[in-house]
Image: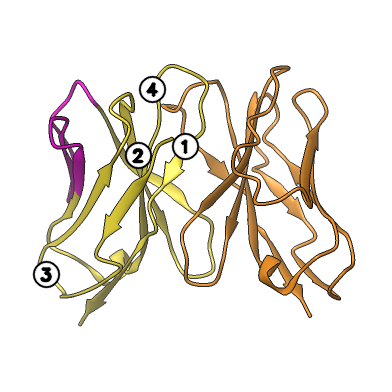
Amino acid sequence: GAGVSQSPSNKVTEKGKDVELRCDPISGHTALYWYRQRLGQGLEFLIYFQGNSAPDKSGLPSDRFSAERTGESVSTLTIQRTQQEDSAVYLCASTRLAGGRNPQYFGPGTRLTVL
Amino acid sequence: GENVEQHPSTLSVQEGDSAVIKCTYSDSASNYFPWYKQELGKRPQLIIDIRSNVGEKKDQRIAVTLNKTAKHFSLHITETQPEDSAVYFCAASLYSSASKIIFGSGTRLSIRP
């Protein structure tokens, strides 16, 4: 079956512009996560959606970052007024059920470059 | 909140030797510890995991050990091969509850021929 997909694969933008990143999880997966991975760095948790529950936004670094998810489908991560330090790969992952024990299936990521 | 520390950040071993990567966690409520492998330019993939009611788990050349009292866990790779070269991430979360997963900072493992 199809895995997690993300678009665009690459995004180059100018400082101050807004960007929107998209994640299509595996069909039927109830949980969806967003991570940021700076060059040579680890996976920084941003936000977590679980079904219809309120998302866990505790990892969002500033109010310029926001994310939405409609039901158990597509999610979009929006970064407003981008800064150079936002340059990173943004990874999305989905899991079949709630609970940390369920393996995370990662998408290929969106490489964001802010000039 | 949970904090996961991982060491070393880079590790180079001779092919055939063993590699050990260590992680510590801060939240005693965490009870599930997965390890992910990320090859160059690819997405992370789960390679092994362990629950807190188990002290050790093995899968062929890979093993993970957990010390709940000390709140640390380790990944052991024996008889390393070139294809083991990758970045490895440890993580901590709750097994049953809906929760976020906190990753360590990663270890870049290089296998010398």
Colour representing chain B: yellow
Mark 3 and mark 2: span between their CA atoms? 24 Å
SS category of the residue bearing label 3: loop
**Which residue in the rendered view is the most extreme toward the right?**
A17
Please state if A4 lies on the left or on the right of A42 as rendered: right
User: Of residues A27 and A34, which is closer to you in this image?
Assistant: A34
Chain where mark 2 sits: B
> Does residue A74 appear in the picture of this structure?
no
Disc number placed over residue B101 in the picture, else none: 1
Chain where mark 4 sits: B
Of pointers 4 and 2, the one earlier in the residue sequence: 2
Name the residue carrying label 3.
B16
Are dots 4 and 1 in contact, CB under 8 Å? no
The magenta segment: B52-74
Q: Which of the 4 image quarters holds residue B9? A: bottom left
Residue type at tag 1: Ile
**Image point 57% across, 25% down: which residue?**
A96
**Image point 73% across, 52% down: which residue?**
A6
Are dots 3 and 4 in contact, CB under 8 Å? no
Looking at the image, what colour scheme do you see? Answer: by chain
How many labels sit on residues? 4
Mark 1 and mark 3: span between their CA atoms? 32 Å
Colour representing chain A: orange
